[in-house]
Amino acid sequence: MKLRLAILGFALAMWAAPAFGQGCAMCYMSALGTTPKSQKALTKGVAVLLVPPVGMMSILIGAGFVYARRRDQQVEEEAVAVRENPE
């Protein structure tokens, strides 16, 4: 299972790799022409805009895993109860 998860993570990382090349030349040159203080502010702004969606996505995926695990445990407990009491 861990191998599958590692392969999935690697595949997602490779799928997202082209996104790093999406910066247009005009935007890059415009940002490069600003002062170092402005460049740092742009970098921080990108990080600030990235954190909420990644955080929400992580929380929702984690909640899905927790829900699935609880559901599987409940189904297993019901199956054991049926095997022990076949009435």
Image (cartoon, rainbow, N blue to C red):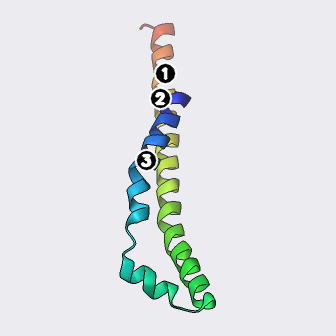
Q: CA distance from mark 3 to mark 1?
A: 37 Å
Residue at mark 1: 76
Examine the rendered structure and indicate whether residue 65 appears above or below residue 60: above
Mark 3 vs mark 1: in front: 3
Q: How many marks?
A: 3
Q: Nearer the viewer, residue 48 or 62?
A: 48
Query: x and y percent of residue 86 in the render?
Result: 43, 7
Q: Nearer the viewer, residue 70 or 86?
A: 70
Q: CA distance from mark 2 to mark 1?
A: 6 Å
Q: Say the numbered circle drawn on residue 72.
A: 2
Farthest residue toward the bottom?
A: 35
Q: Nearer the viewer, residue 35 or 19?
A: 35
Residue at mark 3: 14
Q: Amino acid at mark 1?
A: Glu
Query: x and y percent of residue 77 in the render?
Result: 51, 22
Disc 3, disc 1: CB below 8 Å? no
Examine the rendered structure and indicate whether residue 11 appears above or below residue 43: above
Question: Sequence order check: which comes first, mark 3 or mark 1?
Answer: 3
Can you say which quadrant of the picture contains the C terminus? top left
Q: Residue at x 50, y 16 (%)?
A: 81
Q: Amino acid at mark 3?
A: Met
Q: Say the numbered circle drawn on residue 5.
A: none
Query: x and y percent of residue 73 in the render?
Result: 52, 28
Q: Residue at x 47, y 9 (%)?
A: 83
Question: Sequence order check: which comes first, mark 3 or mark 2?
Answer: 3
